[in-house]
Amino acid sequence: MDSGLRVSILGGGSAYTPGLIEGFIRQKNRIPVDRLTLMDIDAGKLRTVGALVTAMVSDAMPEAQVVLTEDRGEAIRNADFILCQIRVGGLAARHLDESIPMSMGLIGQETTGAGGFAMALRTIPVMVEIAKEIQETNPSAWLINYTNPTGLVAEAIKRAASIRHIAICDEPMILQEALAAFVGTQPEKLFLDYFGLNHLGFARKVFYHGSDVLPALRQKLQVMPKEQIEGVFGEETLKDPKARMELTNTLRIFSETGLLPSPYLQYYYYTGEILKHQQEVGKTRAYEVMEIEKELLLEYARVAAGGKRLEKSRGGRWHADMMIGLLAAIANDSREVFIVNVPNRGSLPELPYEKIIEVPAIVDSAGARPLAMGNMPLKVKGLIQSVAAYEELTVQAALSGSRSKALDALACHPLVGSRDTAWQLLDAYLDAHERYLPQFKR
Amino acid sequence: MDSGLRVSILGGGSAYTPGLIEGFIRQKNRIPVDRLTLMDIDAGKLRTVGALVTAMVSDAMPEAQVVLTEDRGEAIRNADFILCQIRVGGLAARHLDESIPMSMGLIGQETTGAGGFAMALRTIPVMVEIAKEIQETNPSAWLINYTNPTGLVAEAIKRAASIRHIAICDEPMILQEALAAFVGTQPEKLFLDYFGLNHLGFARKVFYHGSDVLPALRQKLQVMPKEQIEGVFGEETLKDPKARMELTNTLRIFSETGLLPSPYLQYYYYTGEILKHQQEVGKTRAYEVMEIEKELLLEYARVAAGGKRLEKSRGGRWHADMMIGLLAAIANDSREVFIVNVPNRGSLPELPYEKIIEVPAIVDSAGARPLAMGNMPLKVKGLIQSVAAYEELTVQAALSGSRSKALDALACHPLVGSRDTAWQLLDAYLDAHERYLPQFKR
Amino acid sequence: MDSGLRVSILGGGSAYTPGLIEGFIRQKNRIPVDRLTLMDIDAGKLRTVGALVTAMVSDAMPEAQVVLTEDRGEAIRNADFILCQIRVGGLAARHLDESIPMSMGLIGQETTGAGGFAMALRTIPVMVEIAKEIQETNPSAWLINYTNPTGLVAEAIKRAASIRHIAICDEPMILQEALAAFVGTQPEKLFLDYFGLNHLGFARKVFYHGSDVLPALRQKLQVMPKEQIEGVFGEETLKDPKARMELTNTLRIFSETGLLPSPYLQYYYYTGEILKHQQEVGKTRAYEVMEIEKELLLEYARVAAGGKRLEKSRGGRWHADMMIGLLAAIANDSREVFIVNVPNRGSLPELPYEKIIEVPAIVDSAGARPLAMGNMPLKVKGLIQSVAAYEELTVQAALSGSRSKALDALACHPLVGSRDTAWQLLDAYLDAHERYLPQFKR
Amino acid sequence: MDSGLRVSILGGGSAYTPGLIEGFIRQKNRIPVDRLTLMDIDAGKLRTVGALVTAMVSDAMPEAQVVLTEDRGEAIRNADFILCQIRVGGLAARHLDESIPMSMGLIGQETTGAGGFAMALRTIPVMVEIAKEIQETNPSAWLINYTNPTGLVAEAIKRAASIRHIAICDEPMILQEALAAFVGTQPEKLFLDYFGLNHLGFARKVFYHGSDVLPALRQKLQVMPKEQIEGVFGEETLKDPKARMELTNTLRIFSETGLLPSPYLQYYYYTGEILKHQQEVGKTRAYEVMEIEKELLLEYARVAAGGKRLEKSRGGRWHADMMIGLLAAIANDSREVFIVNVPNRGSLPELPYEKIIEVPAIVDSAGARPLAMGNMPLKVKGLIQSVAAYEELTVQAALSGSRSKALDALACHPLVGSRDTAWQLLDAYLDAHERYLPQFKR
């Protein structure tokens, strides 16, 4: 790189932004930044988060200019990399995404559950608009998207625009970090033989110095005291019943199948138990996050006003490190392996050739090229194929505004199941989110 | 054919046998029979049904000899065609297959529901034994199997033995008959562009004189009064709430998707409603069938003892006609189209090459050769791929006696869903059916 | 059928027409004809052949009206079936197709050899025009095409128009007739497990009463005296050195590989020998055919003028019978098996899904539906895949007029081989056929 | 790595060995060697080359022990890496491989030409024996094979043994070096979108800083003076008519197709010209190499005897660098991209799933994992599929000793073409190489 990069963050007012900026600061030698544009449609959050970010950057990375803007076009035009972390309809819409299925006895999760469907319908039109704007006004820029539901959004962008684009999710990286902790090494020393779709992936083997460490790890975890296991994930996990349940379920799946799953797999495998838990909790995750965000914004404001160092933020090291590592691999043409969401092209021969999948890929200045991951184990193949079909239908529905496709999509969803429920749910969603779903207006 | 055929019926004591014999009598010119062997391990039923069959045959087809035997080897050795309609564990086992999932809030259907899993574990070892005996003692004979779960049994036989074998189910034929009634023609005038697995198939198009009649039928059914529709299926349907529900659900699926489904699809698409219905009924289908059979055997005994003509039997014309039509196509080398269960070989490219599928095939003396049916509609592809994976795992479990495979299989089943439930169900089944599952003995 | 059919023959002035008409007369009960339109752009041939046909029909099938026309539109509009047997550029162009490669030491055959490439370039634009005219003016008509190169023409029509269309070739039927003669049965009693492309197909198994007769036939032919073998094909074969060579080569391939090939396979397998033979003969097949045609037209004129019965014609029973059998299967919705050229759709999984292939298909009023023929034997798979790629490129070149695609296509042709030769050949062809290749005009 | 590696070279007496050792010396910091075993069955060459190597190593890498042995078992047992560069039958056999087809007017090249077939029949049994010995006596060792025909040998080893194995060829590396020279960068800065089989591969795109440089290079080469182009390849190329022809042909293919081919492609694309050239040269390449080797061994002896530095050797930097780079990537678990020969697993979906292919792969301590390279351009797909079938048949023939498979294989070879020639060639080869082909003994 001749000079520093220009990075724009769409949805820059998010509570995740400061954590990400910390990452840029940590890695400023590897990937120097010249201009950092935060763009958000929520002027209030942009102001609060922007003030903190401006302070952080002027302190630790003074050569970089921070720009705050509500003008998406400006953010898009002045960037080498456009990071995208928007939330169409905000947490209020997420609350509906989650609570509507919950009220019908269904999993109300925002990506894997039926909530992901509603989120896709709302998010895809906006993301396609963004992609088209990039194509027209700044075609050489890279869009790095982690707006959820990531896989579906990537599928839609691929169909609607022709831009330089990688979709990522920090889940596989978190898995890799946790594995490294158990093995006692650095994450980058491991290679995950990982395959699937976003939030529906599995590590089949994990190589460390050429050997698969999963069989030994499986045995070890079966006898290790629960507290010790949780300890690896830090005190926070020990205190959070949701995190503990997720961990327990994930390890049960690993123990029974020998495949290390994305934590989202629990929604498919322990549906009943999770429904029960959600009913006990009695409030949506959106609601919890609203409370967390409120506190965080106060904290951000405190620090921006000159208070002592930031005591909490969202996203954490992992999220920032994966994101910035990916940027660096592209910017520096360094050909590194990342688990990303990319078009299949034969990597998983049992899924359609053009489907967006989540697998290890080589990333360099030319983008991401998937490794050939081969056939999938029979015990998870059907689920993955099934969700792949749901995803394709949902993208078609979101792009076309066809109610019939939307119904077909929901009826395909393994966590919805029945067409009756699908009808009910679709009606409720179209009603609740009407203003965000112009494509479905009759 | 130079001379008449020798036909053996394994499970010949079944209440379905007289209906089948009526078919042979109806079609004796097309396919003359020399020897008819009924074999059953239930001496009582064999005696009752055998007496009736002997009377029927001596009256209408005197050139044919009727043999009753409890010796399977004899029945296998002396046959050109071996029809197989056994029920391992009888209706008592079926009652358990159905009631155990019902008690856990799951669909207790004997093929599509979890019951089909238990039935497969019990039935596959016996059917494989039969197939191997045919291979050794009468390799030129044809095994025509309609013992349920047909697709899974065929999958197991294909792996374990090398015999001449076709697996059939009368469902598609019933569909074709019903369609013909609506169109106002003979069933054989229609061609069903049909694809899927046994009890999980769809007609995508139905050709009559070269045109697809489904779009017009769909419109017509949407306005036709319900009673008139039911009328096509006869008075019996009108009186049977289960049949009416099945019909209603099937037509809803057709109306919404444009695909005409096997009636078993309702279990996937209207799960909640059916569960509710089953709880209201409060007894298993096995229990109902026991009562029906009891009456039928009395009726059979009455007629065999010289009473006037048979007033009821099971299976009906359709079942017998498909079966005997198939036999005739093989025996007469007449190259006709039947929807049967055969190895895929590319007919449905999105399913494994060796998988047993249910599609139209050309049947002649060389057996059944599937037509190339092409890619499946996205809206049902995922479900079919998912159940295909479940079936492969179940067959592996049934052949190997591996609990871990059995668990993986159940956990893949779209109507089971969660691994917790899968564990519970597996334990309950292995316990309840212990004497029929030697392969799982530790 | 309510009334007789209207059949139009494009290229009706061909010497093959009277043989075809004889077929219609032979089968008039199975497939009654009301109107028979012969269309040709060669007024002289149309007059001669038309006079004979008019005489034949008025004699044997007086209810049918014969129409002679030079107006293609008229022939297309007034037809239920449009048979197409045109030859763009006539035999003069064929002479160039064959002689140009011959002069470069290459096989000069009109379909399998490089000649087929030139023929495709000339024929495809005209056939696409015809297909589009059918689509616009008579979309419910069936186009039955046997204009060579049949497979390539079908490929082009499929891409360019959406009409009811089957492409056929009498080769597989001739094979089936010959086999029936050896087995001592009727052709329709056999089922050929046949796969490949037009003029590049193989029978892997041939079933008669459920058993494969090829192994025994192979042994028999290895010991049978050559004369006796040739005798099966009639005196004509015995007298024709070209036919004898073809037969010998075909049987050698069968003997060595166990696969019964289309006779055109000799061009790939005995290239050197055939080149030598062609050089000895010293004239093109086109030239020979010109002489044959001249004599035939004299003979036709003689008979039309009231002379005694026709003593020779072209095409023979086989050709007519396959053609009319196919028409009858469509018209009568009789669902029979024919080996035809149709889109793959998974029938041969190792070829592209949309490729036109030659396999057994069920033919009825809805058209032709291929059987799933499965994977190909390794020993011929590569050749077939290779020619399939050549065909796709040739069609692309013919439709687009791209010299670069044309060169790529020729360079892929197994009988051309080198790019240098391909260049030379392409230049020579584009030059020689300039008036027929407007799409390549710079 | 805790300590240095133990490296054994089978065929260590080869004239290529000193060049390889130079590589080890150059890269001793990256990959330290403890023990270097040269094994050869030719005691004379082992002595000469061994003396030189011993001198080189004691001078530049004194910590490494050099062992010379004729005992293959010893070399296999005492190694972490077994490099294999044997030549079964030596150059005398190669001379026959090349001259026999030449005498029949066919390309006599030792891998791509018919010679590769004979070489495979001789080499595969020995290589399988070696692989089995590794499996039994030193299963954790890596076999790095570049014994030709590399792809076929890899295919055979994969079927016959289960060892850690990568097959490589320096061709793609040479291509990459040449490209780097034209672009003006280091080879490792480029990423080749490369696909195919060994000696039958193409670069479709070549990425440098994220952009494909091929289009510009293609234009540049079309106007660059020939001498200047040749200059990039050094004086040697300018002096060697064979090398100049190869370069010219390779650039012609690139210019016409836009695909940058392996230089071996010229044998398929300019067959006639090369045959002519070979006839003019009048001696086989084997013969030329014999002369080169004779000189080299004298030179090696001179230097070993204390003479001044080596003035010539074989293989050059490229060969050694690729080899040692690959070893280092495995030993250091460094996850780098190399173009190697590995099982397909979906990387090229149009070739069989288990076929050995040549594509970019990630190499680390777990071996080589191919990237998903996707569908191939139509213009080369057929040739590659065709040769893939030939390769599979040849491996089956070499393993089984079946004459019929051998004939099928040769008849599939695009450079043999006719079955007659195939018979003749097979007979000649089986005769000439009888002592090396025990598997074909009747």
Image (spheres, coloured by chain):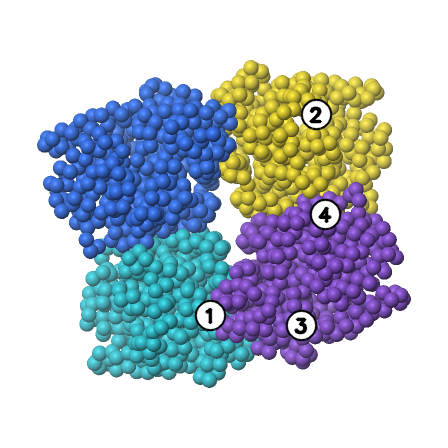
Chain colours: A cyan, B purple, C yellow, D blue
Mark 2 and mark 1 residues within 8 Å of each other at the beta carbon: no
> In the rendered structure, which disc, 3 or 4, sits on the residue that comes first in sequence?
3
Can you tell which mark lies on residue B330?
A: 4
Quick check: A29 above or below B276?
Answer: above
Can you tell which mark lies on residue A54?
A: none
Mark 1, secondary structure of its residue: loop
Q: Residue at x 30, y 59 (%)?
A: A208
- Answer with left or right where residue D249 lies relative to residue B393: left
Q: Which residue is mark 2?
A: C232
Can you tell which mark lies on residue B92?
A: 3
Report how far apart the C-alphas of labels 3 and 4 lie in the structure.
35 Å
Quick check: B53 above or below C50?
Answer: below
Local packing at callout 1 (Cα closer than 10 Å; few below 14, some 14-19, many 20+) is: many
- Answer with left or right where residue A260 lies relative to residue D404: left
Mark 2, secondary structure of its residue: helix
Q: Position of residue A13 (x, y in %)?
A: 34, 73
Chain letter for mark 2, please: C
Q: Position of residue A272 (x, y in %)?
A: 50, 77
Can you tell which mark lies on residue A112?
A: 1
Mark 4, secondary structure of its residue: helix
Q: Residue at x 31, y 47 (%)?
A: D137
* Amino acid type, residue under disc 1 in the picture: Thr
Mark 2 and mark 3 residues within 8 Å of each other at the beta carbon: no
Locate residue A164: give its quadrant: bottom left
* Amino acid type, residue under disc 2 in the picture: Val
- The answer to which of A376 and D384 lies nearer the viewer is A376
Quick check: D115 above or below B172?
Answer: above
Q: Position of residue D386 (x, y in %)?
A: 47, 37
Camera-side mark, 3 or 1 = 3
Camera-side mark, 3 or 4 = 3
